[in-house]
Image: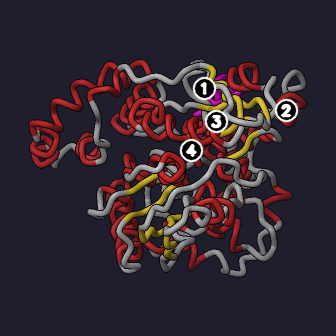
Amino acid sequence: MTAWDVHRPPDPDLIADCVHCGFCLPTCPSYTVFEDEMDSPRGRIVLMRVGNEPDSEPSDALRVHLDRCLGCMACVTACPSGVKYDQLIERARPQVERVAPRPRREWLHRRLIFALFTHPGRLRALAPVLWIQQKLGVNDALAKRLGRVPELQAMLKLAPPVTRRAAIQQLAEVTPARGAQRGRIAFMQGCVQRVFFGDVNAATVRVLAAEGFEVHAPRAPRCCGSLQLHAGVEDEAVALAKATIAAYEGFEHVAVNVAGCGSGMKDYAHLLADDPAWADRAKAFAAKVRDVSELLAEFEPQAPRHPLPMRVAYHDACHLAHAQKVRAQPRALLNTIPGLELKEPAEWELCCGSAGIYNLVEPEAAAKLGARKAANLEATGAEAIAAGNPGCAIQIGAHLDIPVFHPMTLLDHSIRGTRP
């Protein structure tokens, strides 16, 4: 017997690739905050190796150290040995959920997160209430009074600005291409994204159509399962992955404007590798997934750009830069906008602390990382931030009084000749 069960434990061969050189330490946000070897990638790999040993047992310490990982994959970028930490942590986390039971309060908090944020219908029902609370300043007042309930306090503090249209705003299921057609693609609407960042989705579809793509935006499934995948909620992630593949596999490409979603969807091949009925379909589907900046960068610009004189700092979302290795394409697209001056912050590789549900379940550590990221962005002298992930936009916005725009929003304004 080992600490892990028999279903997809961390692979000993992948564990053996780590030579414990320490190159990952300076880029690891949890090591930066907690300053504990077990809260570093190589420390967690040791815990995974010990978990594979005979007579090992799961423990609270094992769960806590694995939970403190943001899953940012900066260590994957930094590692000279090519250690696949991304595959290791995404096997370890479901194990934790099965073999290392959480305290009931913590378990309930996580269930609340997944029961709400991955269900667009429920978020739409909540949107009018949030809008009224924000208009009246109720959220801020409640957050101050919930000091003894940090879980709910974090949710209120990080609630994104909500518009009155959030409850009803929807994309057309098909948007025709403008000009010469370049392809027929699907657009993944996301769960939180379609409700609280519907304007970003609308801008993305307008840009894709202006660049010659016929855009299909199915309303189902409700979620791609990436949030669950990155947090170890494996059964739900698998079910949503299969539903997503079935809904989108008939298109030439699947465009995504949420870094976390794109990362998870590109990882379906690993998630479903052991399922004979889905392994090949998952691999073929993952090859079609593109971040929207990645897709647009494959073609010469078709739509004319109008000047947008702004100083913009570009923030690298971890699941885009580290997990998907997409860094040059968003910058290249922003540089097609006349008058836009792109600024680069220090410590681009360090996570902002959003990391899926991390800023909700580890609010103190996330706040330290958010403040550090905000200081680096502010130091560029930029008047706006560009970030390709809604969680990053929320996290940065909570620590910095500078507007945060999705790159597609800025590109859409340039194409239409409007101002943010």
- Sequence-wise first label, 4 or 2: 4
Q: In the rendered view, would you say 125 is above or below 233?
A: above
Q: Nearer the viewer, residue 168 or 366?
A: 168
C-alpha separation, residue under disc 4 versus residue under disc 2 = 27 Å
- Closer to the observer: label 3 or label 4? 3
Residue shown at 83% from the left, 41% from the top: 287
Return the disc, 2 or 3, that comes first in the chain's sequence.
3
Could you tell me the amino acid type at mark 1?
Glu
Disc 4 to disc 1, how far (Cα)?
A: 19 Å
Category of crowding for the residue at label 2, using alpha-carbon neighbours closer than 10 angstroms: few (below 14), some (14–19), many (at least 20): few
- The numbered mark at residue 209 is 3
Q: Nearer the viewer, mark 3 or mark 1?
A: 3
Which three-letter amino acid code belongs to the residue tagged 4?
Answer: Val
* Left or right relative to 376: residue 307: right
Give the crowd class for mark 3: few <14, some 14-19, many >=20 residues within 10 Å: many
Tag in front: 4 or 1: 4
- Provide the residue designation for mark 2: 274
Q: Which mark is residue 236?
A: 1
Task: Identify the secondary structure beneath mark 2.
Answer: loop
Marks 3 and 1, the one that precedes in the sequence:
3
Percent across and percent down for residue 113 are 41, 33
Q: Secondary structure at mark 1?
A: helix
Determine if the magenta segment contains residue 5: no
**Which residue in the structure is indicated by mark 4?**
258
The answer to whether residue 384 is left or right of residue 175 is left
Q: Amino acid at mark 3?
A: Ala
Circle 3 sits in a helix, a strand or a loop, which is it? helix
The Cα atoms of the two marked residues, 3 and 4, are separated by 18 Å
